[in-house]
Amino acid sequence: MNSSVALPVLIPFATAIACLFVWNSTRLQRGITLLGTVGLLLSGLVLFQEVETYGVVSIQMSGWSAPYGITLVADRLGAIMVLLNGVVALTGVLYAFGSIDKGREKFGFYPLLSAMFGGVSGAFLTGDVFNLYVWFEVVLMSSFVLLALGGERPQLEGAIKYVTLNLLSSTLFLVGIGVLYGFAGTLNFADLAVKLAQTDRPELITVTAFIFLCAFGIKAAAFPFFFWLPASYHTPPPVVSGVFAGVLTKVGVYAIFRMFSLVYTQEMWLTHFIILWMGAITMLTGVLGAAVQTDIRRILAFHSISQIGYMLSGFGIAGVGISAAMAAGVEGQAERAAMLTAGAGMALAGAIFFVLHHSLVKMNLFFVAGAVKKLRNAEELEQVGGLYHARPFLGAMFLIPALSLAGIPILSGFWAKLALVRAGLEVGTYAVVAISLVVSILTLFSMTKIWANGFWAPPPDTPDGERGSDPGDEEDPPGYRLMLVPIVTLVVLMVAMSVLVGPAFRVVQKAADQLLADRVYIQQLWESSGKIERIDALLEERNYVTTVLGEEYLRALLMPIEEEAP
């Protein structure tokens, strides 16, 4: 059973190594990469099913037990993210087959892409902070080369900005790891969660929390660290932009979700309040930046920043809600505490749902932008036009996800934003709710601008009164029809997510409930110190902490307290 946790990491790296052995044959590299991404998706499905059955699954690498060895662990959130990585990988590779040029194919595009997907899976499944850093570096190195591959001047400029700011993130990450290990003596997520819950050094916890928040904020392109994203996402081939939008920034978002729902839960009134407003300002600055752009991919890049803000705001609302619920419980306001707890759960579920929605929608929009470039050899809105009249199907493939991004009913973006708005109203974060609604309107403005100038307006060289070429007049450029396959696939997945919102939201709600339950469980462990029967009952539960650390280690950790109890 547990070996399934390692497969989403092993398969992409095996694929990358196999591609290196057939370096001189791009055809074989294509075939191997396609098989590898199918394998990654299937392994994600198997892992998701096992997590649905068992709740949490883990494996200890090299025979060393936690918290001393290397742990790979999947809970519901991790399994969802690995499955998303598989979807992004398969659709991205299919799109690359129709869009990537021969030069990049010959110089390691496919092994680099596979290595990046392996690093992303590793980040989603690692059970300790240091190996999260290792996987971050794997992702950084492979993504940097993918950005620079081709050697064009705009690419190199974007890649340098990207790697410079991300190296700052890596430095902060290492500093945080050093401080954290210095006073906690462990880097395992579960072990940290248990030990920090009873630490007598809260000031050090807060310091490391903010160090990690800055490091992860850079990775996620959150305010005020987002400058690298709009400077780099429009420069590489569209397939790279799309894949990056699909999973790359989500690694930073996931790290914030993981660390600040499991490890840093001591002063949620402060840490999550800052995350809440970091998200709100990210929303606003991203959408305002998009409003003044005229290049399609730059518009989409700024909107990626804005949408990251929604995810962080949702997570912040959850933390603020839990903190307020705890305070209400202390004051004896049981009904208010229950309402705030429910709002927090909805906010966290909405944030996870938003991650999935945004990955599918934004990846698809970048792919459509690549198809536009293929047809018009341009991405400036004033240089395209007439696309809907000439390519109505492509126009529809843009319009559906664009409306979803803006939050138009009944598409997936609407349901994601509705959950966050409802949760925000229940928790009382009214200002952030108002900002999110304004940002939705401005998002619709940007999407309308692309539609009006790029699709509906006639081409710039068309005489007045004419709409441009008729459908079928233009020949399909090489690879264009193959590019449509992943575009259609992503639209179908997004529509399915919109129509089946009930089952989809139940999946993310269970993931959110599991994250929130871990904090409560750890609190119950310490409250039961000295009560052997109660501890025995708690250790029989299957959750993140017990699955990773095991009953024997937890019992040894709590034994000194049991012996000292009167």
Image: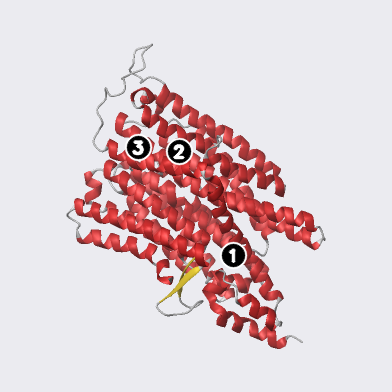
Label 3 crowd (10 A; few <14 / some 14-19 / many >=20) = many
Q: For mark 1, what is the residue? A: 262
**Quadrant of the rendering where the N terminus is positioned:** bottom left
Q: Which of marks 2 and 1 is nearer the N terminus?
A: 1
Q: For mark 2, what is the residue? A: 300
- Quadrant of residue 283 in the image? top right
The disc labelled 2 sits on which kind of residue? Leu
The disc labelled 1 sits on which kind of residue? Leu
Front-lying residue, 68 or 542: 542
Residue 180 horizontal/vertical position (percent) = 56, 70
Q: Is mark 2 on a helix, strand or loop?
A: helix
Q: Looking at the image, how many numbered discs can be counted on the residues?
A: 3
Q: In this view, does 522 lie to the left or right of 378?
A: right
- Quadrant of residue 185 in the image? bottom right
Residue 158 horizontal/vertical position (percent) = 38, 45
Q: Can residue 235 be seen in this view?
A: no
State the residue lying farthest toward the right: 332
The disc labelled 3 sits on which kind of residue? Gly
- Quadrant of residue 392 in the image? top left
Front-lying residue, 212 or 562: 562
Q: Residue at position x 46%, y 77% from top?
A: 69
Q: For mark 3, what is the residue? A: 370
Residue 505 horizontal/vertical position (percent) = 56, 50
Q: Is mark 1 on a helix, strand or loop?
A: helix
Q: Which of marks 3 and 2 is nearer the N terminus?
A: 2
Label 1 crowd (10 A; few <14 / some 14-19 / many >=20) = many
What is the distance, in whole Å, between disc 3 and disc 2 at their CAs?
12 Å
Label 2 crowd (10 A; few <14 / some 14-19 / many >=20) = many
Q: Do the residues labelled 2 and 1 touch (CB within 8 Å)?
A: no
Q: Residue at position x 21%, y 50% from top?
A: 106
Front-lying residue, 84 or 106: 84
Q: Is residue 112 left or right of residue 48?
A: left
